[in-house]
Amino acid sequence: MEIQPLKSGGSRILACQHSFKKALVVHRQLIMSLSGGIFLAAGLLSDRAGEPGWATAAIVFYILSYAVGGFYKAKEGLEDLIQDRALNVEMLMILAALGAASIGYWSEGAILIFIFSLSGALETYTWQKSEKDLSSLVKLAPLEANRVTAGEELETVPVDDLLVGDRILIRSGERVPADGVVVRGSTSVDESAITGEPVPVDKDLKDEVYNGTMNGRGSIVVEVTKENANSLFQKMIGLVEQAKSSRPPAQQFIEKVEGPYVITVLIVVALMLVIPPLIFTVPFQETFYRAMVLLVVASPCAVVASVMPALLSAISNGARRGVLMKGGTYLEQLSKASAVALDKTGTITKGEPAVTDFCVVEKADSEGILKTVAAVEAQSNHPLARAITAFVKKQGISGSVDVESIEDVTGYGVKADIGTAQWKIGNLEMMTGCTETDDTTEEEPLPETIDNHRTAWQADGKTVVYVSKNGTIIASLAIKDEIRPEAKQLIDDLHDLGIKTIMITGDHESTAASIAAEAGLDDWVSQCLPERKVTEIDRLKEKYGSVVMVGDGINDAPAMAKADIGIAMGSGTDVAIDTADMVLMKSELEKISLSFKLSKRLNRIVAQNLIFSISVILILIAANFAQQLTLPLGVIGHEGSTILVILNGLRLLR
């Protein structure tokens, strides 16, 4: 076995470095904060000694407490002031501590610095904890794979070197290094890294396996279906990283007003220093002390921390369960949606259509027609095309037909030239020449036999595909795609939440009505091409307000982009996944219900945090103006509320 040099794993190394740096910063902040606390304790003990020499020593200890405990917070405040020319809450705290020291309140200032630095270290720790899922996720990605050569020998290669079609050996207990299908052996795979489900999934021939999952009891050979950069796992990592770097509207607003708010507080403090001594003859030292307390209690630390820790926790929770968001905005807005539009094939249905019926006109060569249809459809990867070719193969019909040219007409079907004849396979619009690319004359009306079958098939919820030769319809096929059991449950859950459900499909009206009734949908829109799906989303937005679109195909991407929130099935096309705002990694519809509930919890906890933090600030300010609040109590109330809102946000990790 030849060992190749390692060339990949950049994202994993960067994530590990990021995690290490975060942990190092937390440890340093905690050590500096505790060291400042030790100097504070030494200063308080020296104060109690009551001797002149000890009083000097106490001031030295307090100065050390200031310098050591306040180092990181002072650094943050100065960096923002120099780089961004913006004032922040750190500057308010430092000014308050220095102001207290300037009028002889060394101990109060040192207590302020100690509690403020300790809460800062705890805040950094909670942010690191909320990001821990991403770091753990990245570490699961294998760096190397055992590629099987043409001579059935093994070579160890970086996962980035794997190409579509390569075969790799995955031994018992190894992580799957690439997305692929099993071509040899059977096993069970722990997919909890992607789905969050702890129960291993049995894998046999032709079953899919995913990068980052853990192989269980058996060795398997897998054929790679996606390069590493396009694998489900790498997309998962990219989406989580993108989500964690985004800011929802609530957080953006808080960050926007933080600077002006700090300036306003400083102006009020300046007025407090001038007006009471000059107009009301209040002693300057007393009013200065009250101004320093105001600097502390009016600081919006808790308000600033009300959103992001909760949001990051919710995003991490969703990622663990296989729901990825491209930004916090989408999770925050999801519970505000009034309607959910769903594509049919691959979303409401299983996406595994099968031909159930075949009909030809009188005296037609059914075997020849099927042979020709199979030859044309074999060149397409559309689910209906795969269903037709599988049906022909099952009939035992073999032989080849020379297809000279083929044209795929998106949303309608396919045209092919075979010898001197032009064949069409598709929907009724394709047959009647209603496509934008079709300049042929209209087809003849449906033959009576085919028309009779069409009516019965569509009433059963089947999709009808027609076959024509030189403008004459000669055959039709009925294709049925079973409704997912979980689709019915999702629709029931959405109805319980008061959300309308609408199916948008390209199927005929009768078929769409049958499927909608079986699934329990509120409404449906039939015969929708991609451009009409966009129009329908606009109509639904006008009618319901905020609309979610769920789909999996290329033709769903424009509608998902137009909707307020687009949700893609993880098994769908890359275009759909790239366009969507949220992705269900294992295409499990029940995770949509989970996402709505998570969004509601997030908004509820953020509202709790904002109401609590603002209330505490107002109460502390009122107590200060009533001269009933000391600086240490103000610090405890202010920093305590900050820690509480962070801990409340961390509840979303569960």
Image (cartoon, rainbow, N blue to C red):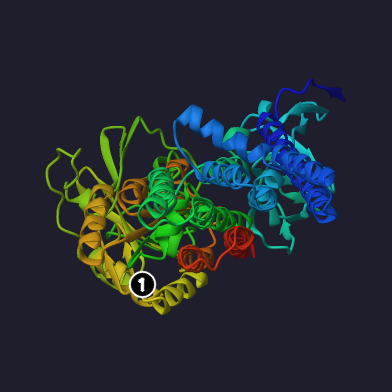
Q: Residue at x 59, y 63 (%)?
A: 637
In this view, which residue lies farthest toward the left?
Answer: 441
On the rendered structure, is 374 left or right of 151?
left
Task: Residue at 75%, 54% (x, y): give it.
Answer: 189
Figure quadrant of residue 196: bottom right
Which of these two is toward me, 130 or 121?
A: 121
| Up-down relation of residue 372 to residue 306 (above or below) | above
Residue 474, given in percent of the width and then of the height, sits at 27, 53
The structure residue drawn at horizontal position 48% and vertical position 49%, both measured from the top left corner, is 572
Where does residue 411 sit, x and y in percent of width and height? Answer: 29, 48
Amino acid tagged 1: Ile
| Image coordinates for residue 322, horizontal then vertical, percent | 59, 56
Q: Residue furthest top?
A: 5
Foreground residue among 82 and 162: 82
Where, quadrant-wise, is the N terminus in this rendering?
Answer: top right
Q: Secondary structure at mark 1?
A: loop
Q: Is residue 151 visible?
A: yes
Q: Residues within 10 Å of mark 1 (few under 14, many from 20)?
A: many
Quarter of the image that includes the C terminus: bottom right
Q: According to the image, label 1 marks what residue?
A: 499
Among the 4 quarters of the image, the one containing residue 26? top right
The mark total stands at 1
Report the residue that reaches farthest toward the right.
Answer: 1
Is residue 139 something one can see in this rendering? no
Question: Which percent across, then down, holds residue 146?
Answer: 79, 33
* Quarter of the view holding residue 244: top right
- Residue closer to the observer: 384 or 399: 384
Q: Nearer the viewer, residue 313 or 141?
A: 313
Horizontal relation, residue 193 to residue 397: left or right: right
